[in-house]
Amino acid sequence: MKARRIAELSMAAVCAGACLALPPQGANAAMKHGAPIRSAHAELARGKYLVIFGSCTDCHTPGSFFGKPDMARFLGGSDVGFAIPGLGVFVGPNLTPDVKTGLGSWTEQQIVTAMTTGKIPNGRTLAPVMPWHAYANLTKSDALAIAAYLKSLPPVSHQVGGPYGPNQTPNEAVMVVVPPDVYANLPKPGGAAPAPAAPAASGK
């Protein structure tokens, strides 16, 4: 009898542990697109954390590179382009769910695909400045959390310029990597203004 009682208690403990291990929705409802289901609030909070921690705001919020991010257009597209030799200039696009200028017509899965493979719905591959190679290491649930958060943002109507080809002139400020000798001859921020040209040269 004692051995039987011990066996019954052991089986009860195993069953209880198995039940506690399952999410509230049950085993069959515990996955979404191959990723664990979170509550909507928890998923959005996780997505917001990852977007801010990953500095998406720097490249996709106007004013960020000048130290004054425009929070009224949070993640609504940058006002600075990145120059890539031989390729052109690329401006961080609008990540809000605006239908015409942002991600409003994209599904969450299309956002995940763009983040993790560099492929966007129109077939174009994102410029190398977008670090999708790094984001390819996101877990499925984290990538979906980011997508859900972006889709939850207030839409911002802001069409960024570009992408610009190598021979096109962008309308935005441009970040360029230059050799040190080239930088040494550039006007320095806050430095003395270039000497004025001689009157004859100025008239010419």
Image (cartoon, rainbow, N blue to C red):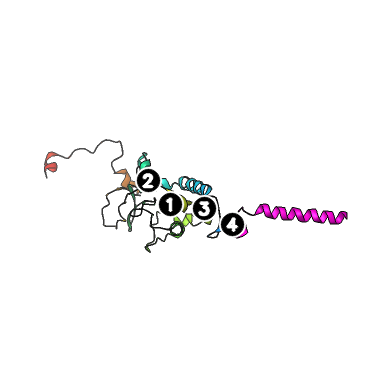
Q: Earlier in the sequence, mark 3 or mark 1?
A: 3
User: How far apart are the alpha carbons under marks 4 and 2?
Assistant: 35 Å
Kindly identify which residue carries mark 4: 30
Locate residue 103: give its quadrant.
Answer: bottom left
Q: Residue at x 32, y 43 (%)?
A: 184
Q: Nearer the viewer, mark 4 or mark 2?
A: 4
Q: Nearer the viewer, mark 1 or mark 2?
A: 1
Counting from the top left corner in percent of width and height, residue 49 is at 49, 45
Q: Earlier in the sequence, mark 2 or mark 3?
A: 2
Magenta run includes residue 13: yes
SS of the residue under disc 3: helix
Counting from the top left corner in percent of width and height, residue 115 is at 45, 56
Q: Nearer the viewer, mark 3 or mark 1?
A: 1
Kindly identify which residue carries mark 3: 142
Locate residue 120: give its quadrant.
Answer: bottom left
From this view, report whether residue 149 is shown above or below residue 119: above
Q: Residue at x 85, y 57 (%)?
A: 4
Kindly identify which residue carries mark 2: 61
Q: Amino acid at mark 2?
A: Thr
Mark 1 crowdedness (10 Å alpha carbons): few <14, some 14-19, many ≥20? many
Q: Amino acid at mark 4?
A: Ala
Q: Earlier in the sequence, mark 4 or mark 3?
A: 4
SS of the residue under disc 4: loop
Magenta run includes residue 190: no
User: How far apart are the alpha carbons under marks 4 and 3?
Assistant: 16 Å
**Position of residue 170 in the picture relative to residue 128 (left or right):** left
The magenta region covers: 1-30
User: How far apart are the alpha carbons under marks 2 and 3?
Assistant: 21 Å
Q: Amino acid at mark 3?
A: Asp
Q: Nearer the viewer, mark 4 or mark 3?
A: 4
Q: Amino acid at mark 1?
A: Lys
